[in-house]
Amino acid sequence: MSKPTFYITTPIYYPSATLHIGHCYTTVAADTMTRYKKMRGYDAYFLTGSDEHGQKIERSAAAAGMEPLAYVDQIIASFKKLWQKFDIDYSDFIRTTEPRHEEVVAEVFRKLQAKGDIYLGSYTGHYCVSCETFFTETQIKDAGGVCPDCGGPVDMVQEESYFFKLSNYGDRLLAYIDSHPDFIQPISRRNEMVNFIKQGLEDLSISRTTFRWGIPVPGDPKHVVYVWLDALTNYISALGYTKGDPRFETYWPADVHLVGKDIVRFHTIIWPIMLLALDLPLPKKVFAHGWILVNEGKMSKSKGNVVDPMVLADQYSTDALRYFLLREFIFGADGNYTEEILVNRINVDLANDFGNLLSRTTAMIEKFQGGIIEAPRGKTEFDDALLSLFATVPEEMAAYMEKLEFHNAFAAVWKIVTKANKYIDECAPWALNKNNEKDKLATVLYNMAEALRIATILLTPVMPNTPAKVFAQLGIAEEKQLHTWESLAYGGIKAQTAIHRGEPIFPRLEWNDGESAPAPKKEGKVKAKETKVAKKDAVAAEQQNADLITIDDFAKMELRVADVLTAEKVENADKLLKLCVKIGEEERTVVAGIAKYYAPEDLIGKKVVVVANLEPVKLRGIESRGMVLCASDEDGLEALLVDKVRSGGVVR
């Protein structure tokens, strides 16, 4: 029986000499999704590459005193080095300067021309060299005389051009979008594109004569193919379309095109219309994610706010960076980046929660059982709550992964990590050992080891290097059958497994208000902290002051600004309002007990503060995913409202 297939792509990137963390965002997401699908038994194919033609490249190469191909060769080498650094395991890297691609582009042009969808005319209008995009007079006027996308200068172009009859396919594309509601995601992008199409599509100029660095138009070599028609074809040229390559039949149509929101129009209007004209099936989904912003602005070399991923990779582990990118930001919404936010996420999630769970577990197995994991043979009142998560979290995570809600997927995994840490404090293994309750002790320590094993398996797609370190310390490095999705059921670790306790896999980082780059604490301090934690465990966890929290505890709460889209009273509930809120690009339902203080219409259009990572609960049969923050005193209650910060903004 053949495996189910999965085909995912990133955009092919423009060869910029300035690499930034945004390049990693899309690619890490695609790689994580590919690894996840492979874990689930799919034949997963992941395509990335580089878009190397166009006037911008030609000008940049000339300014550098180089031929265009030699100019891009050196930049592509840096891209591949970056992907290797971040453990990007792509199936294919397509370059638009490769003959296998250029031949397919020429064949696509011939097919469209033979069908009557391409004609020769002349073009007069505005063109942005940087974005490789044509704009109408109205678009330029509305943008204040500059490029509507990048804000840069535009050229007035007048030249002979071949045109693609985009206007003939607007109604067909609208009908397709209507019958395939998941085709464009998130929904805000879908609505934006639908409105754009309804305004009427103009035929697209698809050739240029003012530069030479491109694929010659078949039969008319004074023209070169417009860079976007060239670039978009990569998704099928890489599979050998028109070449009889079995990969095309196996993987097309693509399951997911991942793109940035700035190029969604090309991927959801021009590309699907090209496919309709070629009588080819459309991709199943185009997902447009948001930008990673620095000081609320898009990264650019001119602004001097580019975050270099290679520098970060040398400062932190790439597994930590991969986890941060997909856990911190809502995929589909913009997210603001600072290095302090990065360090905080690493410290709270990876050092305090996950890394400390591994250290505590192995320390107690070593101390209380001589480094041997014994079979569970007793029972505590706290076992069932932890074991129930082993059964439910994998499918919860899977459901979020299928929707590309990476932040929610890994938040689900953290339910196991958080509960396992709490389980240690509840069961107090040090007390069980002191009281000679060996049967219960064996069960508790076994459950802790299984919690680590199961959580680690679920984290494998996003942190591919971490599992080997965890499994080595748990003594199951060679037990490959215990590393798979199929092994997630409780009870995998064999009795009498010998652990191999090691150094902390995520040492806690110091932060000094950004004056210099943070660094891991000195090894001596790490060991001293570990010893202190182990001693505290062994003496009494309950001695901790439960009334005080640390900044790390506070940081576990994900507070976000949310727009209230709709509000209504919950039937037969005097205190409850059902709110539909938008956090960035994500819409969700929140039930709030504020009906005595607010009429539904009072909140519509307002911005509230929501605890976004609160575990969902059902209230009167309605699943509530979050909590509205309010202040109260003896005179009443008031929701915390925000004025200027946009939806999805972080509250801290």
Image: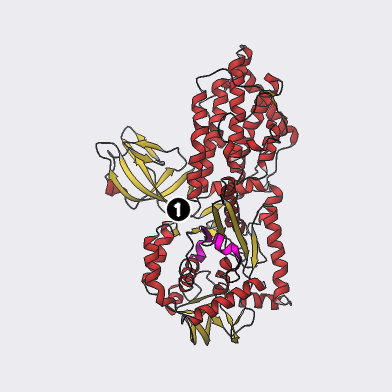
The percent position of residue 40, horizontal first and vertical second, equals: 56, 45
Q: Nearer the viewer, residue 609 or 255?
A: 255
**Given the current orientation, which residue lies at the most extreme left position?**
572
- Side (left or right) of 347 relative to 158: right
The percent position of residue 540, horizontal first and vertical second, equals: 60, 19
Where residue 463 sits, quadrant-wise, is top right
Q: Amino acid at mark 1?
A: Gly
- The answer to whether residue 552 is visible is yes
User: Magenta part of the protein: which range?
Assistant: 245-264
The percent position of residue 322, horizontal first and vertical second, equals: 61, 49
Which colouring convention does the figure follow? secondary structure
Q: Which residue is mark 1?
A: 584
- The answer to whether residue 293 is visible is no
**Given the current orientation, which residue lies at the most extreme top position?**
435
Residue depicted at 54% across the width and 24% down the height: 545
506 falls in the magenta region: no
The percent position of residue 404, horizontal first and vertical second, equals: 50, 51
Secondary structure under the numbered disc 1 in the rendered image: loop
* 453 versus 161 height, above or below: above
**Label 1 Cα crowd, 10 Å radius (few <14 / some 14-19 / many 20+):** many
- Side (left or right) of 44 relative to 137: right
- Side (left or right) of 449 relative to 572: right
Where residue 471 sits, quadrant-wise, is top right
Q: Nearer the viewer, residue 119 or 645?
A: 119
* 315 versus 441 height, above or below: below
247 falls in the magenta region: yes
